[in-house]
Image (cartoon, rainbow, N blue to C red):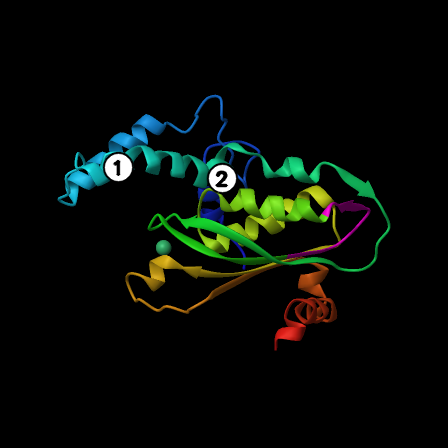
Amino acid sequence: MTLTPEMRERAAGSLDGEEDYPLREAIDHPVDEPRIQRAVREILLAVGEDPDREGLRETPARVARMYAELFGGLHQDPRRHLRKFFTETCDEVVLVRDISFNSMCEHHMLPFMGTAHVAYLPGDRVVGLSKLARVVEEIARRPQVQERMTEQIANLLVDELHAKGVAVVIEAVHTCMTIRGVRKPGSVCVTSAMKGCFRNKSSTRAELMTLIYGDRR
Ligand SMILES: [Zn+2]
């Protein structure tokens, strides 16, 4: 998919040079756990609960720690994982399949989880395979929408690896669709971002799809 200028602007926030993966500086804006605690206490009161009863007493603090973890990616720059590369001539598709991730739907603050398949056709840079998983993980750990997350991972790889092509396919279950709203358990949302040769060359794209889904069809 292609991002509209408006979506791009939204993704960029107000930070220069961070267009696709806005980064909040940890030093200036650390996760404010006491503030989350106060907010969670408010929510409990608002739904008609007693936040002072025994079972809930520690809940605001637990939720604050959880959010600090789930949104930790806001304070990490995923690009750093790709800055250590090997100069290598490789003319074959590199694919890491089934990278599991958890993220948080920014519309409902409910988790969505699934797997990402990340592939690239190297130019002259090759990175350690685990780095691709680290990138997925950090981009997932922030308020997200799946479409943007897919695009962000692909753009980051394009920028950093000078690859001839990049492909990202993400399959995820959104709890905001399974436990509320339309309540469709089992529905899987699939998004993809194809860059360079994966976009232009149908044979390369077909090869990739066989690599990802070949033995599962
Ligand atoms: Zn949602």
Residue 1: in magenta span: no
Residue 111 as seen in the image, left or right of residue 191: left
Residue 113 picture location, percent across and down: 47, 56
User: Residue visible at 69% across and 42% down?
Assistant: 160
User: Residue visible at 51% across and 34% down?
Assistant: 23
Disc number lying in front (1 or 2): 1
User: Circle 2: is it few (<14), some (14-19), or many (20+) Cα within 10 Å?
Assistant: some
Residue 181 to residue 148: above or below: below
| Circle number at residue 40 | 1
Q: Nearer the viewer, residue 90 or 6?
A: 90
Residue denoted by label 2: 12
Q: Is mark 1 within 8 Å of ligand 1?
A: no
Magenta stretch in the rendered image: 118-128
State the residue lying farthest toward the front.
Answer: 54
Residue 134 picture location, percent across and down: 61, 44
- Say which label, 1 or 2, has the lower sequence index: 2
State the residue lying farthest toward the right.
Answer: 89
The image quadrant that residue 165 belongs to is: bottom right
User: Residue visible at 39% across and 39% down?
Assistant: 66
User: Residue visible at 77% across and 52% down?
Assistant: 122
The C terminus, quarter of image: bottom right
Residue 24 picture location, percent across and down: 48, 31
SS at circle 1: helix
Q: Are marks 1 and 2 in contact (CB under 8 Å)?
A: no
User: Circle 1: is it few (<14), some (14-19), or many (20+) Cα within 10 Å?
Assistant: some
Q: Quadrant of ligand 1?
A: bottom left
The N terminus, quarter of image: bottom right
The tally of labels here is 2
| Tag 2: amino acid | Ala
